[in-house]
C-alpha cells in the first residue's frame, strides 16, 4: 500500500542514519536525533504504524488469492440416455391404452353383416395397427378368422377398418397389435373430409391439403339416428392431385340425423 510504503521508508531512513553514525564513529547531535524522531512520530500519527510482519503478509496474500476454478463436474449422461431410451421404447399394450376403439355392427337388408372399428389415436405415437378378428356364433362355434392392417394412424387422428362377417356371427374376438408407423405415403391428416346433407343422403367433399398427390385412399360414412347406426357407405377414393377437391354423393335409405366421415389408407 502506498501510504505504508512512505512510512516504512521514513523508518528505514531513521534506522540507517543511526546505524551509519554508529559505524562511522561519528556522533549524532541530540537536536538532530530529536528532530528525526519528531518527523517519524508525525508520520506515524498521519498514516499509522502497523507494518505487517512476514507471517501476516503471507496470510493476507493467501486470503485474497483468486480461488482456483474447480473442474466442471463429470457429465452424468445416464438421465439423458434414459430419456432417449424411453422415447425409443414402443410398447404395443401401453400405447393401446391411449387409443380408443369403437365397434359398429350392421346387418343390411340382404342379410349381410359388417363390422367397422373406428380407432381414435390419443397416444403420442403415429401407429400402424394389425387387427385380427375371430367370429363365433351363438353356440360359441368358430365361424372364421380375418385380419387387416390400419396404416398411418397419426397421433390425434381417427381412422377405421371394416370387415364383412358371416351372417351368423354373434361374437367377435378382436386382437390388435400396434407398431410405430413410418408414415410413408399419404397422411390421413392431409385429407380434409366433410359431409353436407343432400337429397337421399349427403354430399361428401374431400380435399387433398398436402403438397403431393394422394392415392390408395378409401372412405367410410356412418349414418346415425340418435346413437343407432342406420346405414353406411364405404368405397375407394380416386387419386387426388395436390390441392384438388372432389364431391361425391353418399346415399342412405333410412332416416338419419348425423353422418360421420372417416378416411383410411387402403391396405
Image: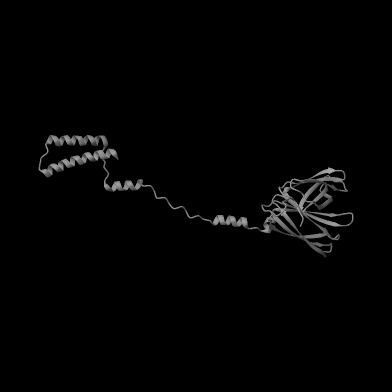
Residue at figure coordinates x 56%, y 57% from the top left:
81
Residue at figure coordinates x 28%, y 48% from the top left:
55
- Residue 106, given in percent of the width and then of the height, sits at 84, 54
In the picture as drawn, the residue positioned furthest to the bottom comes out as 141
- Residue nearer the viewer, 249 or 116: 249
Residue 115 falls left or right of residue 212:
right
Q: Quadrant of the N terminus?
A: top left
Residue 42 falls left or right of residue 159:
left
- Asked if one can make out residue 205 in the rendered structure from this viewpoint, the answer is no
- Residue 162, given in percent of the width and then of the height, sits at 80, 56
In the picture as drawn, the residue positioned furthest to the right comes out as 110
Colour scheme in use? one colour
Residue 220 falls left or right of residue 178:
right
Q: Is residue 99 above or below residue 48?
A: below
In the picture, residue 168 is in which quadrant? bottom right
Q: Quadrant of the C terminus?
A: bottom right
Q: Is residue 149 above or below residue 41?
A: below
- Asked if one can make out residue 4 in the rendered structure from this viewpoint, the answer is yes
In the picture, residue 114 is in which quadrant? bottom right
- Residue 104, given in percent of the width and then of the height, sits at 80, 53
Q: How many marks?
A: 0
Residue at figure coordinates x 82%, y 53% from the top left:
235
- Residue 3, given in percent of the width and then of the height, sits at 28, 38
Residue at figure coordinates x 59%, y 56% from the top left:
84
Amino acid at each position: 500500500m502506498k501510504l505504508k510504503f512512505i512510512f516504512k521508508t521514513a523508518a528505514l531512513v531513521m534506522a540507517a542514519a543511526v546505524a551509519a553514525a554508529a559505524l562511522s564513529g561519528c556522533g549524532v547531535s541530540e537536536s538532530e536525533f530529536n528532530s528525526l524522531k519528531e518527523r517519524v512520530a508525525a508520520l506515524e500519527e498521519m498514516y499509522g504504524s502497523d507494518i505487517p510482519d512476514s507471517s501476516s503478509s503471507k496470510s493476507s496474500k493467501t486470503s485474497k488469492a483468486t480461488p482456483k476454478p474447480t473442474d466442471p463436474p463429470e457429465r452424468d449422461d445416464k438421465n439423458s440416455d434414459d430419456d432417449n431410451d424411453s422415447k425409443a421404447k414402443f410398447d404395443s399394450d401401453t400405447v393401446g391404452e391411449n387409443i380408443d376403439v369403437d365397434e359398429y355392427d350392421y346387418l343390411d337388408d340382404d342379410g349381410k353383416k359388417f363390422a367397422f372399428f373406428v380407432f381414435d389415436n390419443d397416444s403420442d405415437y403415429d401407429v400402424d395397427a394389425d387387427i385380427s378378428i375371430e367370429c363365433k356364433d351363438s353356440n360359441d362355434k368358430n365361424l372364421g378368422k380375418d385380419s387387416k392392417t390400419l396404416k398411418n394412424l397419426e397421433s390425434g387422428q381417427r381412422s377405421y377398418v371394416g370387415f364383412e362377417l358371416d351372417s351368423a356371427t354373434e361374437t367377435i374376438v378382436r386382437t390388435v397389435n400396434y407398431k410405430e408407423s413410418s408414415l410413408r405415403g399419404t397422411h390421413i391428416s392431409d385429407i380434409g373430409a366433410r359431409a353436407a346433407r343432400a337429397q337421399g343422403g349427403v354430399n361428401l367433399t374431400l380435399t387433398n391439403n398436402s403438397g403431393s398427390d394422394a392415392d390408395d385412399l378409401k372412405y367410410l360414412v356412418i349414418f346415425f339416428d340418435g346413437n343407432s347406426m342406420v346405414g353406411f357407405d364405404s368405397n375407394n377414393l380416386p387419386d387426388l392431385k395436390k390441392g384438388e377437391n372432389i364431391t361425391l354423393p353418399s346415399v342412405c335409405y333410412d332416416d338419419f340425423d348425423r353422418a360421420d366421415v372417416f378416411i383410411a389408407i387402403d391396405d
